[in-house]
Each structure stands twice: as structure tokens, then as C-alpha cells.
Image (cartoon, helix red, strand yellow):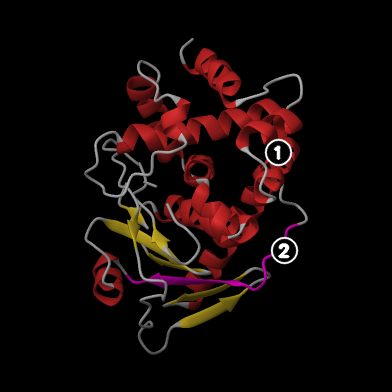
């Protein structure tokens, strides 16, 4: 689920946080959610638009068409960035666009800070500022969870959130600026040791250092993609999906660059602290 300004989700089980945007970035953490979607339906007369990868429901034909095109745009970028060219989802993702925040909260039961939620293969969103950033973040979770499988997605929470934050910043300039500011002011001066980062799993929006953790994992994923390219990143994901340890996946994928997580940590620090 996304809190109006972000970050989590395990297949059908978790909701994410807020999307950073504008002048007041703030990250909210994941909270465990029911496996079953709380979707109660849009009002009679809503429109449905179907594309290759999505079934989008909104209140107007133009809205459904606009959001379905936006979904496909985000989807194409995510698959290209992560190198998942050959991956095909089992079925179309369902996207529900509520009229506004009030309707979204009333019909889903989500907390007031939530800006969107993902359940199973469905995204529940609402019209308003930041929708594209939320869509990109949550859509990345859906794709990551399905590609990796539930158990691996759960055990690699830092990577799950990292790719979602990275794609969120790729979709929205406000989010990109907010996270860049967080990295510069909160992460670079005092990075979270990777040994802690990979095991930390923020569970509430009030937990100390949540913002810094999300900013850092997003930065680390961006570093991996830039250094090795999307093809190498896809190999890294496939190895992890197959049960290989992070250290072994790094050594096998990025030969000559890093052999273990501490090697990646050292290289990443040199970039963010220069």
C-alpha cells in the first residue's frame, strides 16, 4: 500500500507505503493485510478497459483508457529495467481506480495515510496527485512477487522494496527528487550496514529509520542496475529465485566486480558518499 508520499508487499499478503512527492517526503512502512482483496466495487456505470496485461476499471471511458495506457507504460519500463523480457504473468492484473481518496478509504478500509494497496494480482488506487508513482511502486511488487515466488519474495524483503522504490523514482520526478534528498541527507552520512539492511523489515509507519531504510534499499538496487545493466540484474534475480544465496548470486552474476555482499556495500558507499 502506498501512503500519500512510500514503500512493501508480499504476494497477496502485504500492503505498501507512501510515495515521496513534493516538498514533504515521508515513508510509511508495510503493514500486514488480509490475503483477500477488500475491493467492494465501483458505482454502477463504471467503465472497463482491457489491455495485454491489465483489466482496468474506472468511472469514465476516457479515464479507463488513460489509466490502462499508463499501466502498460509502467509495465514496459519495469520489465525492461529489471531485464524480465521473457517473463509472462499468469493472468492480467486487475487495476481499480476509485474516484478519490474518500471513496478509496471508505470502500477498502485502508488507513487514512494509505494512498493505494496491492492484493494478489490486483491494485486498488484512486485518482489524484501521485497516482503514477503509487502505481509504479505497487505494480513492481506484483511483478516481483509473481516472478520470484512468495517464499523468495518474503525472504528478500530488502530487494522487493528496493526494486519498487527504484521503479517509483523512475516513474515520477517528485519521488526521484524526494528519495535523492533522503539518500543525500539521511543515508550517505550514516549508511545502514548491509548486514542489518538485508534483515530489517519495517512493520509500522512510525518505526524509527523507516525512511532511511527505504531510501537506502532503493539506492542499492539502482546501483546494481546501473553497474551491471538490466540483463545482469535479471540473472541475479533468477539465481536468487532458484535459492542461491545473495553472496553466491553476486559472485556468479557480477564476476570481477563483487564476490560478497560486503564488496557490493563498499562499492555502493563510494558512490553515495563521494
Farthest residue, direction bottom: 44
Residue 128, visible in the rendered structure: no
Residue at screen point 27% across, 73% down: 103
Q: Is residue 44 magenta?
A: no
Please report whichever mark, 1 or 2, sits nearer to the chain's N-terminal start: 2
Q: Quadrant of residue 108?
A: bottom left
Residue 253, image x, y percentages: 74, 33
40 and 248: which is toward the camera: 248
Q: Which residues are magenta?
A: 87-99
Left or right of 151: which side holds 22?
A: left
Residue at screen point 64% across, 57% down: 147
Q: Is residue 239 above or below residue 232?
A: below
Labelled disc at residue 230? 1
Q: Is residue 92 above or below residue 242?
A: below
Q: Is residue 14 above or below residue 91?
A: above
Mark 1: which secondary structure?
helix
Residue 169, visible in the rendered structure: yes
Residue 172, image x, y percentages: 47, 43
Q: Is residue 97 above or below residue 30?
A: below
The residue that label 2 is drawn on is: 88
173 and 11: which is toward the camera: 11
Amino acid at each position: 500500500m502506498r501512503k500519500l508520499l512510500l514503500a512493501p508487499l508480499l504476494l497477496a499478503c502485504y500492503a505498501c507505503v507512501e510515495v515521496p512527492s513534493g516538498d514533504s517526503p515521508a515513508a510509511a512502512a508495510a503493514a500486514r493485510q488480509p490475503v483477500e482483496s477488500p475491493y467492494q466495487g465501483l458505482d454502477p456505470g463504471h467503465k472497463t478497459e482491457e489491455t495485454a496485461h491489465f483489466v482496468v476499471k474506472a468511472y469514465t471511458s476516457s479515464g479507463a483508457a488513460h489509466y490502462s495506457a499508463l499501466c502498460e507504460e509502467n509495465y514496459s519500463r519495469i520489465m525492461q529495467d529489471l531485464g524480465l523480457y521473457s517473463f509472462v504473468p499468469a493472468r492480467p492484473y486487475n487495476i481499480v481506480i476509485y474516484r478519490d481518496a474518500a471513496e478509496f478509504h471508505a470502500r477498502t478500509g485502508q488507513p487514512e495515510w494509505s494512498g493505494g494497496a496491492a492484493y494478489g494480482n490486483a491494485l486498488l488506487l484512486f485518482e489524484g496527485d501521485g497516482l503514477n508513482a503509487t502505481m509504479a511502486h505497487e505494480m513492481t511488487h506484483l511483478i516481483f512477487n509473481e516472478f520470484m515466488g512468495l517464499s523468495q519474495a518474503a525472504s528478500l524483503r530488502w530487494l522487493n522494496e528496493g526494486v519498487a522504490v527504484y521503479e517509483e523514482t523512475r516513474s515520477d520526478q517528485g519521488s526521484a527528487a524526494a528519495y535523492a534528498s533522503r539518500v543525500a541527507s539521511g543515508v550517505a552520512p550514516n549508511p545502514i550496514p548491509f548486514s542489518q539492511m538485508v534483515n530489517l523489515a519495517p512493520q509500522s509507519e512510525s518505526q524509527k529509520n523507516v525512511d532511511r531504510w527505504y531510501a537506502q534499499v532503493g539506492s542499492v538496487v539502482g546501483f546494481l542496475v546501473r553497474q551491471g545493466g538490466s540483463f545482469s540484474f535479471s540473472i541475479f534475480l533468477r539465481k536468487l529465485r532458484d535459492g542461491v544465496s545473495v553472496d553466491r548470486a553476486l559472485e556468479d552474476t557480477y564476476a570481477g566486480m563483487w564476490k560478497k555482499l560486503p564488496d557490493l556495500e563498499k562499492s555502493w558507499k563510494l558512490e553515495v558518499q563521494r
